[in-house]
Image: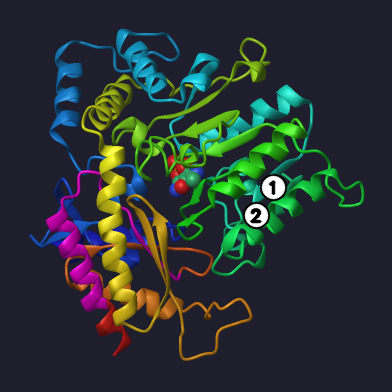
């Protein structure tokens, strides 16, 4: 039963993975948004493998694509050798990129995880520019390998790891709820982007021109924080002007989740490098970087790796990207995400502990705060991680799996599959409402 598997997991798995202790569910079966534990209890899954399961669990098109691949004797693994499935995957992916970017795009299969693709992106821009530093943002999350961790803001994950990539400069992200550089309205974003422009150009800032700037258009792990479109446009203008490649990490935001195929499209910008993973493998491990051909300065053999030829992941990813396109799921994510957002805002008005509801499409978050304390000079209340954990527990007890994120683990994150129905949205919001009221009691 559930307890047996959980005890066994706690005894044998590394301490490093602590979040399963907050979600003590041994999943036996899963379909769509639903998972069933070993005791037969069913939950709504709004974690979706941290955004990986764009179509939910075991969607029929994914299962069918895998079945067909197995029935057709497709080689399961080919290193970098090509196959019809791989070529179709690239065709489908490129067809969804902004056309002016796709025309000049090169793809590098990395893998199997998002962090592998981040590493490749860093190596690419360093090789192309001959520069050694990188710029990243407060609260950014790019993975747990050496280079990716160096670019990640979260100190708790890296302060005990000596010898990370030293030359990373962190700049403030426009976290409008807490960061004065992101204060609401055009002016706040202007101040933030002005600052970014100046530190790169200022000979006394101590910052060498970076090989690249890496950014999430909506920070995921950092607390579901969308960068305002004008700020992203400024970042693009500045990096273009100073000839610094701009890397958009779309590992979590990509493939329709935010209401556009890629989240940077909301700002109408074109990056130099796009990092993709999670949903593009249709639930299987796959990661790629797609970049402007002008950066393709790698010597032959400069970037190798064994697991870059997983044909099942490409078959599943192809099926998912095609399904999202054919069914207009990015637009649907925007519409239904708007419905969820309004319901979360209604919960905010009816309860006392939600400082902000924010996000884009079906990537939403509610920041849990302590309203008993006074707000600070920019109007934000202190974070309340204990209460956020209590909300999470009350949701779980009512059949809703959610994960926390943000600088202080005080943001409740909603990442339902893009196939979520309006009735399920209703159910999610009702459970959340009850859970917040119960946690506040
Ligand atoms: N970048 C972003 C934006 C992510 O959200 C993540 C994973 N949460 C990663 C990179 C790292 O991906 P992986 O865990 O597959 O290495």
In the visual, does 28 lie left or right of 329? left
Question: Mark number for residue 164?
Answer: 1
Residue 8, x across and y down, in percent: 27, 60
Question: Mark number for residue 27?
Answer: none
In the visual, does 197 lie left or right of 289? right
The residue that appears at 42% across and 20% down in the rendered structure is 94
Question: How crowded is the residue under tag 2: few (<14 C-alpha within 10 Å), some, or many (20+)?
Answer: few
Residue 426 in magenta stretch: yes
In the visual, does 14 lie left or right of 194? left
Q: Is residue 284 above or below residue 312?
A: below
> Across the whole image, how many numbered discs are drawn on residues?
2
Q: Is residue 375 above or below residue 107?
A: below
The reply to whether discs 2 and 1 touch (Cβ–Cβ < 8 Å) is yes
Question: Is residue 244 at least partly visible in the picture?
Answer: no
Residue 62, x across and y down, in percent: 20, 30
Residue sitting nearer the eye, 71 or 122: 122
Question: Mark number for residue 161?
Answer: 2
Secondary structure at numbered mark 2: loop
Residue sitting nearer the eye, 148 or 337: 337
Q: Is residue 155 above or below residue 110?
A: below
Q: Give the magenta range.
A: 410-435
Tell whether circle 2 marks a residue whose Cβ is less than 8 angstroms from ligand 1.
Answer: no
Secondary structure at numbered mark 1: loop
The residue that appears at 55% across and 38% down in the rendered structure is 248
- Outermost residue, left direction? 40
- Image quarter (top left, top right, bottom left or bottom right) of the C terminus: bottom left
- Image quarter (top left, top right, bottom left or bottom right) of the N terminus: bottom left
Residue 167, x across and y down, in percent: 76, 45
């Amino acid at each position: 039963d559930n307890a047996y598997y959980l005890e066994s997991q706690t005894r044998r798995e590394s301490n490093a993975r602590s979040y399963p202790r907050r979600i003590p569910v041994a999943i036996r079966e899963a379909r769509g948004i639903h998972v069933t534990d070993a005791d037969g209890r069913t939950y709504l899954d709004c974690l979706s493998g941290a955004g990986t399961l764009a179509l939910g669990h075991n969607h029929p098109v994914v299962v069918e694509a895998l079945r067909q691949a197995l029935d057709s004797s497709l080689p399961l693994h080919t290193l970098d050798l090509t196959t019809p499935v791989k070529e179709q995957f690239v065709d489908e992916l490129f067809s969804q990129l902004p056309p002016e970017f796709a025309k000049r795009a090169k793809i590098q299969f990395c893998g199997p995880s998002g962090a592998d693709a981040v590493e490749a992106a860093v190596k690419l821009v360093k090789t192309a520019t001959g520069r050694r530093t990188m710029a990243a943002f407060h609260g950014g999350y790019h993975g747990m390998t050496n280079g990716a961790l160096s670019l990640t803001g979260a100190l708790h994950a890296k302060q005990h790891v000596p010898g990370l990539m030293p030359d990373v400069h962190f700049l403030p992200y426009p976290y409008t709820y807490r960061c004065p550089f992101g204060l609401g309205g055009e002016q706040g974003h202007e101040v933030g982007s002005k600052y970014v422009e100046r530190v790169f150009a200022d000979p006394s800032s101590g910052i060498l021109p970076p090989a690249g700037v890496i950014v999430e258009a909506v920070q995921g792990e950092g607390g579901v924080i969308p960068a305002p479109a004008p700020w992203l446009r400024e970042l693009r203008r500045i990096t273009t002007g100073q000839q610094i490649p701009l890397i958009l990490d779309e590992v979590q935001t990509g493939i329709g989740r935010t209401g556009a195929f890629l989240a940077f499209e909301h700002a109408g910008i074109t990056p130099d490098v796009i990092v993709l993973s999670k949903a593009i493998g249709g639930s299987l491990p796959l990661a790629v970087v797609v970049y402007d051909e002008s950066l393709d300065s790698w010597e032959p053999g400069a970037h190798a790796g064994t697991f870059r030829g997983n044909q099942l992941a490409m078959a599943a990813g192809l099926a998912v990207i095609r399904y999202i396109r054919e069914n207009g799921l990015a637009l649907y994510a925007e519409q239904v995400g708007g419905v969820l957002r309004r319901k979360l805002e209604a919960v905010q008005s009816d309860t006392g502990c939600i400082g902000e509801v924010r996000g884009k499409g079906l990537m939403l978050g509610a920041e849990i705060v302590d309203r008993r304390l006074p707000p600070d000079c920019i109007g934000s209340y202190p974070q309340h991680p204990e209460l956020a954990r209590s909300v999470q527990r009350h949701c779980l007890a009512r059949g809703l799996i959610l994960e926390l994120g943000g600088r202080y683990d005080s943001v409740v994150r909603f990442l339902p599959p893009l196939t979520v129905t309006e009735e399920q949205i209703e159910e999610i919001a009702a459970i959340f409402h009850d859970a917040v009221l119960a946690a506040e009691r």
